Image (tube, rainbow, N blue to C red):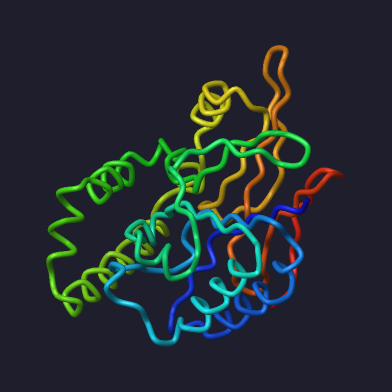
C-alpha cells in the first residue's frame, strides 16, 4: 500500500505552471497510490463552493478521475482554503477531515494537520485564525457577492504576505511545545504537516520517547510530497 501527502501548492491564475504541475502529478505519480492526503492550501484562495475558477477545471477533473479510479482522496483545510465545503467534496470525490486527525499508514499511525495551529507564537495570526474559522464570520463573508469576496480575499492575501515578511522566522514557525503537546495528546510518534514552507524531517527527543515531525514543502520551483509504504516514508522533491 502506498500513501502520499502533499500541501501548500497555492494554485492560482497567476501560476499556470503550478496548475500544470499538479495535474501532471495527479495523472502520473498519484495513480500509483491508494490514498492521497491534501493537507491544506492547495488553493491560494477559496471564497466559497459557489464560485469555481474556470482555469481550475482541469484540477477538479483530475481529482475526480483519480477518485473514480479507486484512490481515496482526503483533504484538510489550510489557512487559504478553509472555506472548501461539501460541494467541492462532491465535485472531486474528496473526503474532508477534521483539522487534526490520526491516520493509519502502512508502518505506523500518524497525526496529520495543516500546521498553522502549531504556530502559537504568532498571536496576531492565531487571533485572526479564530475569527475567520468562526461560523458567524463565515456566514457574513459567504453572504457577500462573489465580486466582494474576491476583493476581500485579495486584500487578506496581500496583507498576510506583507505582515509575514515583517515577522521573524521564529514567530512564523511552529512552537516546539505545541508540537510536543499535540503528539502527546494523540498518543502517536509521527506528526505530518505543512504550512511553514520549510520541508524537513525533524527528530524530537523526549523522556522515554523518540518522535518525528515531517514538514511538507510548498510548491514553487520544485514540488514536494511524502511517500509512505511498507518500507517507511520518504520526503521527495522534484523539479517543476
Q: Residue at x 27, y 48 (%)?
A: 133
Q: Residue at x 22, y 75 (%)?
A: 151
Image-quadrant location for residue 108: top right
Position in image of residue 64 (x %, y %) = 54, 72
Q: In this view, does 192 lie to the left or right of 133?
A: right
Q: Residue at x 59, y 69 (%)?
A: 68
For this orientation, the residue located farthest to the right is: 231
Q: In this view, does 8 lie to the left or right of 124?
A: right
Q: Which residue is drawn at 40% across and 56% down?
A: 164
Near-viewer residue (155 or 184):
184
Position in image of residue 180 (x %, y %) = 56, 26
Near-viewer residue (49 or 141):
49
Q: Is residue 162 above or below residue 134?
A: below
Q: In which quarter of the image is the C terminus?
A: bottom right
Q: In this view, does 195 lie to the left or right of 138?
A: right
Image-quadrant location for residue 142: bottom left
Near-viewer residue (13 or 107):
107
Position in image of residue 154 (x %, y %) = 29, 73
Near-viewer residue (97 or 10):
97
Q: In this view, does 230 lie above or below 157?
A: above
Position in image of residue 195 (x %, y %) = 51, 53
Q: In this view, does 110 lie above or below 172?
A: above
Give the tally of numbered discs.
Answer: 0
Amino acid at each position: 500500500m502506498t500513501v502520499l501527502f502533499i500541501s501548500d501548492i497555492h494554485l492560482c491564475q497567476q501560476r499556470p505552471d503550478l496548475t500544470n504541475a499538479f495535474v501532471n502529478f495527479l495523472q502520473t505519480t498519484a495513480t500509483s497510490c491508494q490514498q492521497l492526503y491534501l493537507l491544506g492550501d492547495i488553493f491560494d484562495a477559496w471564497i466559497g463552493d459557489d464560485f469555481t475558477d474556470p482555469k481550475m477545471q482541469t484540477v477538479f477533473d483530475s481529482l475526480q478521475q483519480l477518485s473514480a479510479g479507486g484512490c481515496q482522496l482526503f483533504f484538510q483545510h489550510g489557512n487559504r482554503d478553509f472555506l472548501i465545503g461539501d460541494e467541492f467534496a462532491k465535485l472531486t470525490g474528496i473526503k474532508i477531515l477534521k483539522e487534526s486527525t490520526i491516520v493509519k499508514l502502512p508502518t505506523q499511525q500518524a497525526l496529520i494537520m495543516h500546521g498553522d495551529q502549531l504556530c502559537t507564537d504568532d498571536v496576531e495570526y492565531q487571533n485572526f485564525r479564530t475569527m475567520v474559522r468562526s461560523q458567524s464570520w463565515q456566514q457574513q463573508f459567504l453572504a457577500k457577492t462573489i465580486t466582494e469576496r474576491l476583493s476581500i480575499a485579495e486584500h487578506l492575501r496581500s496583507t498576510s504576505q506583507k505582515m509575514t515578511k515583517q515577522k521573524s522566522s521564529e514567530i512564523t514557525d511552529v512552537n516546539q511545545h505545541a508540537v510536543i503537546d499535540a503528539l502527546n495528546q494523540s498518543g502517536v510518534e509521527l506528526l505530518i504537516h505543512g504550512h511553514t514552507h520549510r520541508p524537513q524531517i525533524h527528530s524530537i527527543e523526549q523522556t522515554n520517547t523518540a518522535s518525528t515531525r515531517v514538514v511538507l514543502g510548498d510548491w514553487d520551483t520544485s514540488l514536494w510530497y511524502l511517500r509512505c509504504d511498507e518500507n517507511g516514508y520518504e520526503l521527495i522533491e522534484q523539479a517543476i
